[in-house]
Structure formats: structure tokens, C-alpha cells
Image (cartoon, grey):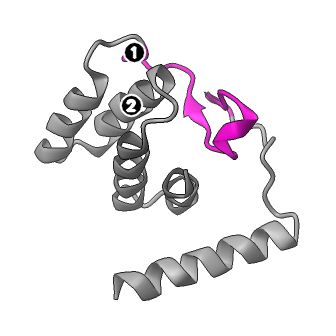
């Protein structure tokens, strides 16, 4: 079930953190964190939508179309514009999971 999956992912995440396999300050080419508050989520630095008005709504449209990589860029742009938007973080986490990027999904969903 979904709950079992996310419980397992959380346990694996905590184990990696315990072993210091992950850190909030890892360098990832092409990505950057916007602040330590974001707890390790790495945003794409070359996001063409970072100043896009209505980025969240555009992201939802692209999600419905099934374009996961573009959806992620729009949702990241929405969060860069409004870092405390819980709904944008939730959709970003779900989209990252669907795009098989579990680490980013976990971090986004924790926000």
C-alpha cells in the first residue's frame, strides 16, 4: 500500500541520515538550495520558469498532461516565488515520486 511504501522510504531516509550518507550541503551539478530551511531540496539552477507568473497553475496543467520534468520546473519556480506554499511542496513531492526521484520527493513532502 501507499502507506507502507512511504513508511519504508522514511525508514531508509533516516538510516541514510544516521550513516551520514546524505547531507543538507551536498553539491549537485546544475542544482542549488535556496536556503537551509528547505532541508536539502536542490532546485534546478537553469529553471526557465523561475520568474513565471502563475507558475503553480502552469505546473498543475503540465501535471495533467503528464509532462513530469516540466511540471517539476514550474512547481520549483512556484516554491522559489513562495517558499511556504505547502500545496506546491506537496505537488512537487508527488511529482518527484512519480518521476522516480525518491530523495527529492521525500524532502519536498517533508516540507
- Residue 48 got which mark? 1
Residue on which disc 2 sits: 73
Q: Position of residue 37 (x, y in %)?
A: 69, 38
Q: State the extent of the magenta-drawn residues as a range.
A: 29-50
Figure disc tally: 2
Residue 18 image position (x, y, % from top left): 85, 72
Give the residue displayed 56% in from the left and 84% down from the top.
8
1 and 2 marks in contact (CB < 8 Å): yes
Task: Residue 75: say if magenta.
Answer: no
Q: Secondary structure at mark 2?
A: helix
Which secondary structure, mark 1?
loop
Identify which residue is drawn at 43% across, 16% down.
Answer: 50
The image quadrant of residue 1 is bottom left
Position of 48 with respect to 24 (left or right) is left
Q: Is residue 32 magenta?
A: yes
Dot 1 crowding, Cα within 10 Å, few <14, some 14–19, many 20+: few
Spatial CA span between label 1 and label 2: 8 Å
Question: Eyeballing the image, is 15 above or below 88?
Answer: below
Tell me which corner region of the image, top left, top right, bottom left or bottom right, holds residue 35. Answer: top right
Asked if 41 appears above or below 46 in the picture, the reply is below
Q: Residue 28 versus residue 87: which sits nearer the camera? A: 87
Crowd class of label 2 (few under 14; some 14 to 19; many from 20; radius 10 Å): many
Among the two numbered marks 1 and 2 on one chain, the one whose residue lies closer to the N terminus: 1
Amino acid at each position: 500500500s501507499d502507506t507502507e511504501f512511504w513508511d519504508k522510504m522514511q525508514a531508509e531516509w533516516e538510516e541514510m541520515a544516521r550513516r551520514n550518507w546524505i547531507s543538507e550541503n551536498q553539491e549537485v551539478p546544475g542544482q542549488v538550495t535556496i536556503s537551509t530551511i528547505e532541508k536539502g531540496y536542490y532546485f534546478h539552477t537553469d529553471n526557465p520558469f523561475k520568474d513565471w507568473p502563475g507558475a503553480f497553475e502552469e505546473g498543475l496543467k503540465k501535471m495533467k498532461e503528464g509532462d513530469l520534468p516540466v511540471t517539476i520546473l514550474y512547481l520549483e519556480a512556484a516554491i522559489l516565488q513562495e517558499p511556504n506554499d505547502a500545496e506546491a511542496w506537496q505537488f512537487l513531492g508527488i511529482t518527484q515520486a512519480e518521476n522516480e526521484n525518491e530523495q527529492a520527493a521525500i524532502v519536498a513532502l517533508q516540507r
